[in-house]
Image (spheres, rainbow, N blue to C red):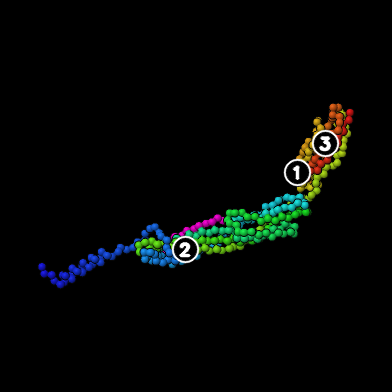
Amino acid sequence: MRITLFTLLAAIGLAGMCILNAQSPSPAKFTSVPSRAAPSGGGVNSGGEVVATSTFAPPMISTAIHDSSPVTVAIAGPAALTAGMTGTFKLQLLLSLPTTTTTTVQTPAPDTQVIIAVTKTLKIQSATFTIDSGKGETASVSLPGAVPSGSPASLSATFAFQNPGTYSVSAKGTAWVQVTSTIATTTSSLINGTTQTLTKTQDLQEVTSYPLSAQQQLTVASSGVPMLTPIGNKTVNAGRELYFWIDIYASDPRLLPLTFGVVNLPPGAICPSVTLGNQKGEPIWLGGDPEFHWTPTSSQVGIYTVTFTANPADGRTVSETVTITVTP
């Protein structure tokens, strides 16, 4: 068979093309495979492959909280005192915003995926307040340390109130809230048919100040105690009725309600225990209520000791002890 030079060259060219086609790799595709840790900042791994380094700039992360204050403040203290007493007022602070995490996924290139996770953690970094008693006396208080979100904190001040009246106890100050945004950027890239992963973490911090205030009303009552009109000792013959009124005078309406009672009431005697009050909040004078009734029998001849008491709302009892003598 005659083989021409043209036929030989054509055969050699066809074989070469077949060899080239057999050695050409198929186009790479981005596939999800188990990632492996990359050297810090990128580099070359033990297999000689170039490990991905993230050149993708994540968007600006806002560390702002919001316009209104996330801290609530309130005063907890007595609403009523008696002149000469002291009151402790607690300023209660609470940061109510919880820790939050947001995640975004972006693909800046066909073979690259970027996952950005932002975790925000808040705390009251510091707080300074002035508590005003409403009578010209103030106290400066501050937090001894940072307080995390969800944990209440309290600052307190104690004042003495010598004069009766109505006072507005107030507090003014500033709380500084720190928000820490932890930004974790994970970049996955396909290099030489293998997915390489690099994670970088960055913390951003911002402190925002918030002016705060709170107040509460305090009523200081007079130290005056209620009065029992003197009753005096009594004498009665057996078989005769002993009868008298018991007058009670409440010198300060803020001492109401007032409870009247009797101790060692003789058998057969009547003197009801009552609670006195005045809806209008004015000083009261009660005559003829309560009243004492007793008709002793001949078998009750003797001496009896009876105590009449008046117990105001502030707990200070006034009393009078009376001797009743029953004669034949």
Q: Residue at x 28, y 65 (%)?
A: 24
Query: Nearer the N terminus, badge 3 or badge 2?
Result: 2
Tell which tag, 1 or 3, sits nearer the viewer: 3
What is the spatial separation of the Cα atoms under label 3 and label 2, in whole angstroms? 87 Å
Looking at the picture, how far across and down is residue 280, in whole percent? 76, 46
Q: Pointer 1: what residue?
A: 257
Helix or strand or loop: what does disc 1 sit on?
loop
- For the point 30% across and 64% down, the residue is 25
Residue type at mark 3? Val
Which residue is at a point 47% across and 58% down the rendered structure image?
103
Circle 2: element type: strand
Q: Is residue 105 found inside the magenta-colored segment of the image? A: yes
Q: Which image quadrant for residue 46?
A: bottom left
* Total residue callouts: 3
Residue 234's spot in the image, x, y percent? 87, 35
For the residues labelled 1 and 3, say whether their Cβ atoms are less than 8 Å apart.
Answer: no
Report the span colored magenta.
97-108
Q: Which residue is mark 3?
A: 306
In-front residue for pair 23/48: 48
